[in-house]
Image (spheres, grey):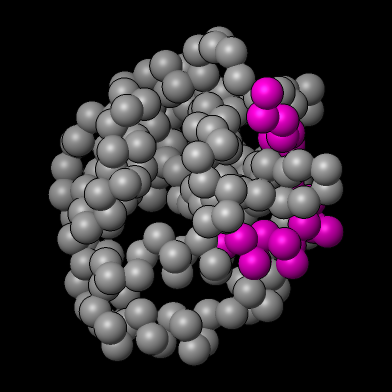
Amino acid sequence: MVRFQVRDAEVDDAPAMGLVMVESFLSAHRGQMPDAAFAKRVDEWTPEVSAVGWARSLAEPADGNPDRDVVLVAEDRGRLLGLVSGGAAEGAASSTTCEIGALYVHPQHLGRGIGRALLRTAAGRLADLGYTELQVRVLSANGPARGFYEALGGHETGQAVDDEEGYLLPVTIYGWTDVKDLDRDEPGPRRDRGSRARTVSGPII
């Protein structure tokens, strides 16, 4: 059986989170954006830069979790394998709509069910915080990610664009009308539901 744990992210995780975030993003999105925009990402967005952002966000005090955010990591014997971040959906008409801002698994550990476990655990935590609906934005060119969310019951709810270094990239929005649908019990890796998610505010890194 594949074994790994999903738990709350901590400040000390920031360097490993920066590494996973950057290497996963670059691996997943190569060929999905203009070469100039991708090259700028490679040159300027290093694991160290990402780690600084994660550390700053994770170090901010809880203060009752006003933004109702969740940041989790997956690890195996002390090695960080993936991460997920979620919170209030920007621009949503309802305060009970949340979104996944980041979901990345290190490319060396794809196919182990880590992304699925991270997403399902985050959905459960977000439901505990009072959210009822969930959405996620995906580059329309990212076929594997779109297939992943569709397999988990996500329905296409709209189209948008993301500005990547001045290039407008088409985005597909997927949604779940009941966030709890993603957290139904099923066999799989152990998920830590024993503690509340640590408060994180600020931009996704």
Residue 20 inside the magenta-drawn segment: yes
Residue under the image location 50 percent in, 12 percent down: 184
Quadrant containing the N terminus in the rendered view = top right
Q: Residue at x 63, y 74 (%)?
A: 47
Q: Is residue 53 visible?
A: no
- The residue drawn where x is 68% and y is 42% is 74
Picture quadrant of residue 51? bottom right
Q: Position of residue 185 (x, y in %)?
A: 55, 10
Question: What residue do we see at 35% from left, 70% from top?
Answer: 30
Q: Is residue 125 magenta?
A: no
Residue 70 lies left or right of residue 159; in this view the side is: right
The spot of residue 196 in percent (x, y) is 73, 30
| Left or right: residue 184 compared with residue 34 | right
Comparing 15 with 67, the one in front is 15
Q: Compare residues 102 and 147 and report the one nearer the observer.
A: 147
Q: Is residue 201 visible?
A: yes
Q: Is residue 64 above or below residue 141?
A: above
Residue found farthest to the front: 1
148 lies left or right of 187: left
Give percent across and percent down for residue 117. 57, 30
The segment highlighted magenta reads 1-21
Quadrant of image for the C terminus: bottom right
Determine whether 123 is above or below 169 in the image.
above
Give the image location of residue 10, x and y in percent. 79, 51
